[in-house]
Image (cartoon, coloured by chain):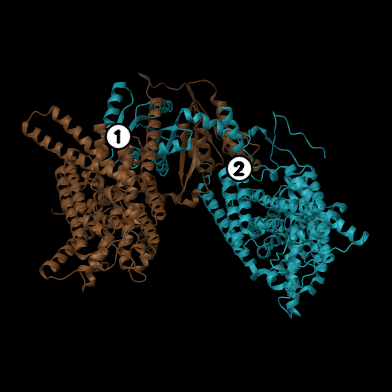
Chain colours: A cyan, B brown
Amino acid sequence: MSKFATVTKRLLLGRPFRSDRLQHTLLPKRIALPVFASDPMSSVAYAPEEILLMLSIAGASAYVYSPWIGLVVALVMAAVVASYRQNVRAYTSGGGDYEVATVNHGPRWGLIVGSALLVDYILTVAVSIASAAANIGSAIPFVATHKVEFAVVAILLLTAMNLRGVRESGTAFAIPSYAFVIGILGMIVWGLVRTFAFGDELRAESADLELVAEEQHLAGLGFAFLILRAFSSGSAALTGVEAIANGVPAFRKPRGRNAATTLLMMGVLAITMFLGLLFLARLTGAVIAEDPAEQLVNAPEGYEQKTLVAQLAGAVFTDFQPGVWYVIFFTGLVLVLAANTAFNGFPVLGSILAQDRFLPRQLHTRGDRLAFSNGILFLAGFAIVLVIAFNAEVTQLIQLYIVGVFVSFVLSQSGMIRHWNRQLRDERDPAARRAMRRAQVINAFGLVMTSAVLVVILLTKFLAGAWISIVAMAGIYFVMGGIRRHYDRVAEELKEIEGEQVTLPARNHAIVLVSQLHRPTLRALSYAKATRPDVLEAVTVNVDDAETRKLVRAWDEHGFSIPLKVVESPYREVTRPVLDYVKRVRGDQPRNVVTIFIPEYVVGRWWEQLLHNHSALRLKSRLLFQSRVMVTSVPWQLESSKRASRRADRSRPVAGDVRRGLFERRGNGDRTREPRS
Amino acid sequence: MSKFATVTKRLLLGRPFRSDRLQHTLLPKRIALPVFASDPMSSVAYAPEEILLMLSIAGASAYVYSPWIGLVVALVMAAVVASYRQNVRAYTSGGGDYEVATVNHGPRWGLIVGSALLVDYILTVAVSIASAAANIGSAIPFVATHKVEFAVVAILLLTAMNLRGVRESGTAFAIPSYAFVIGILGMIVWGLVRTFAFGDELRAESADLELVAEEQHLAGLGFAFLILRAFSSGSAALTGVEAIANGVPAFRKPRGRNAATTLLMMGVLAITMFLGLLFLARLTGAVIAEDPAEQLVNAPEGYEQKTLVAQLAGAVFTDFQPGVWYVIFFTGLVLVLAANTAFNGFPVLGSILAQDRFLPRQLHTRGDRLAFSNGILFLAGFAIVLVIAFNAEVTQLIQLYIVGVFVSFVLSQSGMIRHWNRQLRDERDPAARRAMRRAQVINAFGLVMTSAVLVVILLTKFLAGAWISIVAMAGIYFVMGGIRRHYDRVAEELKEIEGEQVTLPARNHAIVLVSQLHRPTLRALSYAKATRPDVLEAVTVNVDDAETRKLVRAWDEHGFSIPLKVVESPYREVTRPVLDYVKRVRGDQPRNVVTIFIPEYVVGRWWEQLLHNHSALRLKSRLLFQSRVMVTSVPWQLESSKRASRRADRSRPVAGDVRRGLFERRGNGDRTREPRS
């Protein structure tokens, strides 16, 4: 291959990977944090905004409740983080909530968690990308006016990247995630410094807009319901916490403790950012309307409502435009990374479900790129449908979101309570028992909080969209149940009969299928001979009289000791005459076996595949339905197959590798330079 | 299966077919005529109209030339019919023009004819359906305003019908074809009777419209060019004549003579209808404008130009509306049948080209439904693209049409001249020589006429659209040439080395792949034993530690004499560890052979396929790339596979069966009642 061709190919396909470079390396906390926390931390980009937006329905006066709602959300988040710190210490295999629910409540409950999380991954992609579009649209008006297109293109790019096999790289995640955290925290701190140290008055661009309530006379129950709705939208800030539980195998040892510490760091950062943003919003008087065109009566012509983060950045960095761009850019980027997280988490969850035979088994073993690709396409396809159906509106998508996460939270925390009960039964050491009791109390508190939130979500969001997620979960639940039942039925059918022995068949009748007399045929004859059958004969199907006569003549001239039988085929079919012949020679003796040898050409290019082996393939697939018939392929490797074989020897990363602790070693067989931690 | 399910399935899939009911039956002339002649005869529905339409560019005064153009077209048609009567007598195998060109000019010229005819089949579908839409639209305004949609839906319906495997039935064709001929001839005769016997004045609805020339001052060369364009559009009447040459095998014996007689009948009918329609058009003063909106200055508001046939029917059956509907309906129907003809001719031509290895070989043998389906989808896909691209306008599509047919005519007639020269060389009998001379003169006359028309077509239509067809032909030509070269290269690579003998491999190392200890595994072990290998061992890949331990324990408990080897797989892959192990045991000895036994589950439903055998399939396809490795599938038929096997035992007709003389016997094994002829 020319130098140019090689370079072009590298550019298109990336560096070739060798599988022996794949190995386990484990993530230090400071790399694990951004890899796993981009999802939960990025949700602070939209959760505070959604609280204000919901409250706006009752008018600007309702904004006074936002800090209180924020505090309750932060409290729930703290409870959930504390609970999951117990989970990751107790379950380090990466099974996460699914494992906790399965072990403690039984497989049916585990399956509910699995279904809920699968649906949730789809929504993570949709919500994150929609929010990224809204944020980037706050800086680039073109994106704002083409949000759906932007979101679809972004999802397609992520899909292509993940299909191609892009490894989640620690540094690639670390830089934007840390940059995002620094940007948000920096903005909050600088805003506070300007206000309280310099005495500046920070004003968001929307601060002077007059917000008109959509529902004028909300009172009593109606108002309480609205507060609950705002709260449940804000609870979106909690999504993604459960993901770390699936990534425990990727942590350095002691895995559980390191994962717990990372969770704590993540929780502290997320809560700080979340409350800080809500406080800044109050400080700058930012107004977020649910329906800007209707509610903002004195807005200037063509006013486009920016996201809360963009408005706050504009207010804090009044005279420092790069600061605004920095915050908006990294917010957008971290949201895209959060979506990418789902692309990696989805196949990992699929693999775990496949191990328990709720999904096709090939999802369990690494390397079935086709299976993984189908998973990625499934995820991307549904996310795109959602983005288009809901016009890439975060506010609408969020109605479908989080119901799944909270179902998973509740089942996981209640499972953990049982877990500790079981542990306590066998534990006699008082210190250990105290620790368990403490953990159980934390999980119980988590359960109470998350159950309450789940009830609130179901009450306030069911009709607004959560029913769609629940229907989808139920659908996935039943499909997975069906798959499991199928596998169980097959296992039952195949079960070894006690003490059944390996009995030698009485008679092995070998048939070599011949179409022409060429080297693959000679090889097939020779291999067939090597199996020392009781009868060995060559069979050809007479599709074309002239060719058959030529073959018979060549056969006779060659002087084979093996007889050639000609099977007639009046309709130029190959499959049926062979099948009929095989049935005839097999006979009724249950201990007789027929072996069919089929010479096959192995070609390298996809279009060559179209030109060869079709009769052989069709015949093979039909012969499999015959009992007591073995089908042996005798391959003949054509020149072009050698190149293809070399190509196939390369292996490439698969989405989700990092989460499962599978890393790739780069360089000349050296291990990756271990980052100091 | 419940009664209800059976009935539903019958409705959806049609009656089950049994292949032993397939047999040769042959067509009597009166059935062959409508089957093969719907294509050439239907073209009289648009050819006369296109002549008037072209002439309209020069204004109403140019219409005086239409009878003369019609006469020249009729003359050419007579010459072509006479020529093909010689062809079908000389070549009765059904190879048609392709065979004539290949035998007499060599394979390259044959390939040109093949490419031209493939393109032409696509255009037959597009033009016929577009014309059907225009005719039916003349009666149903909704179709007129939705021509493209109607055409696309019609093509999709034909596609579905042919994919499902609808046999061309003689009667299904005979009724509409004869009804069409009766309708058109009846209309002509009744029009003449009314005019000349009753003295009625027949006026087409467009007779009073004032036609303005698009190009006002056409004179000299410009005008002559227009006349030629009108003539070449009118030559579309000749398309389809060549199709009978491909259907000769379906005729009763003596095939050649019966086909020749059918051709004569077809020619007489087509010429009569063609000239009759042109004469009626003059008589009724029908006006067909190329651009009705611009050219018909005094047309009433919302005037929609009807097809010529519809206008004539309206003029002739003034007070008898059912007559008008009859003519329009059967014209539309016969045009749809003509399109269906292409769906049947296309795979037949493909089969012949595949026999000569210009197309994938599987097209040659009957029963590869997939290959046929791909051909049908290819045909339909391109026809739909054309219909959409040219807005279902017959006038535009016709610019692309007929260049292919005339390329084929010219090469076929020139080939026939060579054919007779060769025959004359060996023939001594003066009477036979005279007959040959006469046939040669007829073919020569046909060659002169068709060559002249081809030149006219190239001159007048190249820029108007024929270049598209020529580019398509060239593309198909090169692809088919490439396929042939590939097959030749492979044949060279596989060629038996003179006197090479069947040598027994020195050592056969058999490996049974085991994932669980169940009955399929036991069967594989027993079959492997039956081949008496030099080494026999069981191998399992350790994808999951717990499962592997379970398997090893069960293996030991069972007390097999065959050892079980565990191959490690740190990345939960199956393929690569097995490949590496196989390479190791195969060693470097060129006379050693490795046989891999893979237990496979055979399931019946498509979704069950998704759940099984993926590791086995992937492994098999990779093992084929290893030299000196045989791969043996040991199938285990699960319960659900039995039903699937019964389903597969049924066979269904394939598009093009009738043309190849393959018929289906109905009833309880009785032969089809032979129609008296």
Which residue is painted at 65% across and 66% down in the image? Answer: A466
In this orientation, which residue lies closer to the viewer: A357 or A61?
A61
Which residue is painted at 27% across and 63% down in the image? Answer: B287
In this orientation, which residue lies closer to the viewer: A25 or A58?
A58
Q: Let me know if residue B162 appears in the view.
A: yes
- Helix, strand or loop at disc 1? helix
In this orientation, which residue lies closer to the viewer: A392 or B94?
A392
Mark 1 — on which chain does it sit? B
- State whether residue B652 is above or below residue B617: below
Residue A167, quarter of picture? top right
Other residues around mark 1 within 10 Å, as few (<14) / some (14–19) / many (≥20): many
- Residue A164 tag number: 2
Circle 1 residue: B109
Mark 1 is on which residue type?
Trp
Mark 2 is on which residue type?
Arg
Q: Is residue A444 left or right of residue B623?
A: right
- In this rendering, do the residues under marks 1 and 2 share a single chain? no
Q: Give x and y (percent) for residue B43.
A: 26, 54
Other residues around mark 2 within 10 Å, as few (<14) / some (14–19) / many (≥20): some
- State whether residue B368 is above or below residue A421: above
Task: In the displayed orientation, state which residue is furthest to the top.
Answer: B499
Residue B196, quarter of picture? bottom left
Q: Is residue A30 left or right of residue B670?
A: right
- Helix, strand or loop at disc 2? helix
